[in-house]
Image: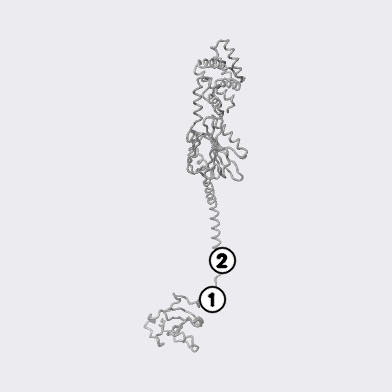
Amino acid sequence: MPRNYLVHLPDGTEYGPVDQATLVSWQAQGRLPEETLVWPEGAPEWLPVTAVLSPTTGAAPRPTPAGGVPRATPAGGVPRATPAGGVPRATVPVARPTSTGPIPRARRERTPFPVPPWRFLAVAGALAGVLALLIFLGWLARPWVARRVRIVAIQRQALPDRRLEDATLGLAVDLPPGWVALRTQNPYLDAPQARLRLAQPRLAAFATVAVAVRPRLMHAADAHLDELLQARIASRPSSRETGRAEVTLGRGRGRMVRTAWDDGLVPMQGATVAWADGYELFSLDAWAPAAEGPAFAREVEALCRGVLTRGLVDQRIEDAVDRISLEVPELSHEALRLLVAERLSDNRPLDDVPQAALRMVSRGLDALAPQEAQEMRAIYQQVWAPVPEAQRDRLAALMSDVKAGRELPTPDVQQLRDALKTGVLALPPAERDRLQELSARAVRKALQVP
């Protein structure tokens, strides 16, 4: 059976157990000084390494006392007696199964213990698992990364302003948190007619604000919404309406229509809000991916609450109506606003409003329901009753000329207006109110107002 050895170097370092072949190799490499001591396993004493590796060394050493490990032999080669108990004094450290000091290179040159194949499989499996986890995490983070890239890209096109104003329109918008104003030239919105271009980068939502002159629709926001939806059919052929509702603005209220459509393979949702300042009709058109859900509606409502219209056009109309209303008592306030707005929107003078009122009422009378037309004629009979019969026939002829669209001399128009004004103001209040109501309908019919 091969014998093992403990090695004690002169500096006090110990190694072992090692076999004799290792000792021979270390000595051949010059790693064992001559003062090195060796304790053969089972020997009674420490021996010089030269004695152990000498060719004459071959006899089995004497057995070690029970339980004892010999101490290193002092100078002269004679070991001291081992005290009772068999444990040598610690003049030389006790040999241990492995050394805590540096390991000679010869020990590293021993044949390594073969690694079981399952360990390679375990390592490969662990690496594959880590790689799969990283891929999965990357897949989960992809929407977040795409959103961050989109937000940064949109913000590069944003203006620093948080309050947008158009003095000519009397329009101001205080942007809520999350919304930004975009430059006129930007890669996201191709809207040359828009007055404002907005974006909500977090939702990939965009919006434009536009204005149109529509005097006949200034009291018909829903009709203006229908007009806007019809104009977008070409660009959004799959668009469908999903609901309408009132919406609160920063000043006043508007009407909102919600829509949905498909932009290629991406479902989209939209909201269009309409409101008026006199004959100027504003519209806010906003859209975002349908995946954003109710958050889009909340953002649009927040944006609407920041919209402020000063009402400059509306005030111009009201001032004009106040000046003219006494001259045309047969018309309601709403009907007179329509006639005034028609002229102001085209920068026309208001001098012909009294004559236009006669023409619109006489033309619209034929478009009323038969019962309403008969009721209106009966009221006008009361209006003309105080006028002498001869003058009444002449005034009736003038009314026919007005209805036909022929221009009358100013004195004739004034005579006709004075007689009508006197008769209307003489009516009982209930009859006068009813006449104004029917006249307003006749004017709307004549103007083909929804």
Query: Left or right of 332: which side holds 79?
Result: left
Mark 1 secondary-structure assignment? loop
Location of residue 290 in the rendering, given as x and y in whole percent from the top left corner: 56, 43
Viewer-closest of 58 and 209: 209
- Dot 2 amino acid type: Leu
Quadrant in which residue 39 is drawn: bottom left
Residue assigned mark 1: 111
Q: Is residue 379 visible?
A: no
Q: Is residue 208 above or below residue 54?
A: above
Mark 2 secondary-structure assignment? helix
The answer to whether mark 1 and mark 2 are in CB contact below 8 A is no
Residue assigned mark 2: 121
Q: CA distance from mark 1 to mark 2?
A: 23 Å
Crowdedness near tag 2: few (<14), some (14–19) or many (≥20) residues, C-alpha within 10 Å: few
Q: Is residue 197 visible?
A: yes
Location of residue 302 in the rendering, given as x and y in whole percent from the top left corner: 49, 40
- Dot 1 amino acid type: Thr
Viewer-closest of 411 and 149: 411
